[in-house]
Image: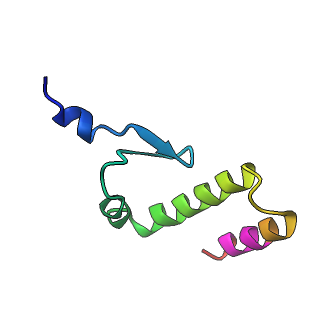
Amino acid sequence: MDNTHEENTPNQTIFDTINYNPNEDLSPLIKNLTDPQKKDLVKRILNYSYKQGIYNLSESEFISVLIRYL
């Protein structure tokens, strides 16, 4: 059986957005994103973190304002 396909297949999801193979480095994935894609990803990650209750209200407001300036 060929394990190459299994090794290269994304099998983990982080931030409910990114599917990747944890055995591979994330740097190439991130480096290949365009600037608008990077900004969108940051927004999605921050939104995910907010929904998980990681930030308090003041921190959430600060992040919200900051995102508007990206």
Closest to the observer, 48 or 2: 2
Find residue 43 and report its horizontal and vertical position in percent.
Answer: 61, 61
Q: Is residue 14 left or right of residue 25?
A: right
Q: Is residue 31 left or right of residue 69?
A: left
Q: Is residue 45 left or right of residue 2?
A: right
Q: Is residue 66 inside the magenta stretch? A: yes
Quadrant position of the C terminus in the picture: bottom right
Residue at x-position 39% and y-position 65%: 34
Residue at x-position 67% and y-position 55%: 49
Query: Is 43 above or below relative to 23?
Result: below
Closest to the observer, 11 or 36: 11
Closest to the observer, 13 or 38: 13
| Farthest left residue in view | 1
Query: Is 11 above or below relative to 31?
Result: above
Find residue 38 and report its horizontal and vertical position in percent.
Answer: 47, 64
Find residue 40 and report its horizontal and vertical position in percent.
Answer: 54, 60
Q: Is residue 56 inside the magenta stretch? A: no
Find residue 23 and report its horizontal and vertical position in percent.
Answer: 31, 48
Looking at the rendering, the stretch of residues picked out in magenta corresponds to 62-67
